Amino acid sequence: MNDPIDFVWRGTDRHGKPAQGEIAGASLPLAKARLRRQGVRLTRIRRKRRPLLGIGKDRISAADIAIFTRQLATMVRSAIPLVQSLDIMAGGTENAALRALILNVRDDVAGGRGLAESMARRPRQFDSLYCSLVAAGETSGTLETMLDRLAGYREKSEKLKSRIRGALTYPLAVVCVAAVVTVILLTRVVPTFAETFAGLDAELPGFTVFVLRLSDLAVAHWRAGAGSALAAAGAAVWLPRRSRRAAELRQRALLRLPVIGPLLRNAAIARFARTLATLFRAGTPLTDALAAVAEATDNAVYAHATRAICEEVRNGQSLAGAVRATKLFPPILEQLVGIGEESGALDDMLAKCATFFEEDVESRVERLTALLEPFIMAVLGLLVGGLMIAMYLPIFRLGSVL
């Protein structure tokens, strides 16, 4: 798919008054046609290439797609024709990239394509799970219901992700600031004290000697250390995006961490249960639903486990048994899935599991946030205070030195 284009135009409106502006379109003829429908007589129009979708000032986030889905569900429920609904939504958004995306989908629908088919042509914004549910809604005549379920699923998923991101971003930012402050103290402040101590013909405290040696190392190797740290951080971010194996190794390492591990594990389980419940409730066959869940999950470890579950179910194993065989899911999920299979209410049991683990994640995030703030402040105080004490210890003992 080509990148969306914004066109800058000048001309006169339907009343003959000078007018100018911008309009998004997939091609120049489409942009001209839209302006003609608005009563604009063009004198000049040129294209202005915008940043790629998802990059730059106007980007399309997962939260934008969640809001788009909720708005579209409301429009369809109000019996507004689909093309008109998309037109209204495009006119109501200030995000140029999202507006271009909506107009592109609208043009496809107006040209005779189904909504799911139009969205499937834009996989960066609409994944296979999303398109499967929309297609199921179009086929069964329940598009409004499917969009409602999709909107609810997306909103809960984004809420969970934002809570986890918020809980992890704050300590990470503080650690980075602490590292920068420490490097500045060791390379700029401590050497100044070292010059003063060099004139003292006395033995320095062991703690001070240790900090001075640490300062010498920092001054000599801070560039190499900073470069290595940046390279390691870049590799940790870039490699998992290029290699499924690297992504799985990183996820496994994170899941083993003492506090963050259980949080990420329960978030992955909640997404697994919520996604499977949404698809199964929409009438998607279990094996197809599991395949879609594996593609939609954000955790490489649980994506691999879901594919294994899918294979076991295809081979005749029950879902509860296949879940148990992975040894990655807690007993409560296995038990509720088993009850759901026996009672024919698997979607309800999965939804209850998802709610339980979502609430558990929120509770853990709240506790983690409450504990991290004083802990981080204490660590920063010890770090900076320790360096200062090491430098002032010889001054405190100045009387005995002299």
Image (tube, rainbow, N blue to C red):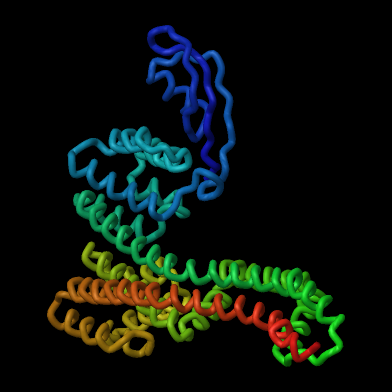
The residue located at (27%, 65%) in the rendering is 279
Residue closer to the observer: 93 or 128: 93
The residue located at (31%, 34%) in the rendering is 88
Q: Position of residue 190 (x, y in %)?
A: 75, 75
Q: Position of residue 317 (x, y in %)?
A: 29, 86
Q: Is residue 326 left or right of residue 184?
A: left
Residue closer to the observer: 248 or 199: 199
Q: Is residue 80 left or right of residue 207?
A: left
Residue situated furthest top in the rendering: 16
Image vertical order of residue 137 relative to residue 157, above or below: above
Q: Position of residue 201 (x, y in %)?
A: 86, 88
Residue 344, visible in the rendered structure? yes
Q: Position of residue 77 (x, y in %)?
A: 18, 44
The residue located at (24%, 41%) in the rendering is 75
Residue closer to the observer: 115 or 4: 4
Image vertical order of residue 6 relative to residue 317, above or below: above
Q: Quadrant of residue 238?
A: bottom right
The quadrant of the picture occupied by the C terminus is: bottom right
Total marks shown come to: 0
Residue 287, visible in the rendered structure? no
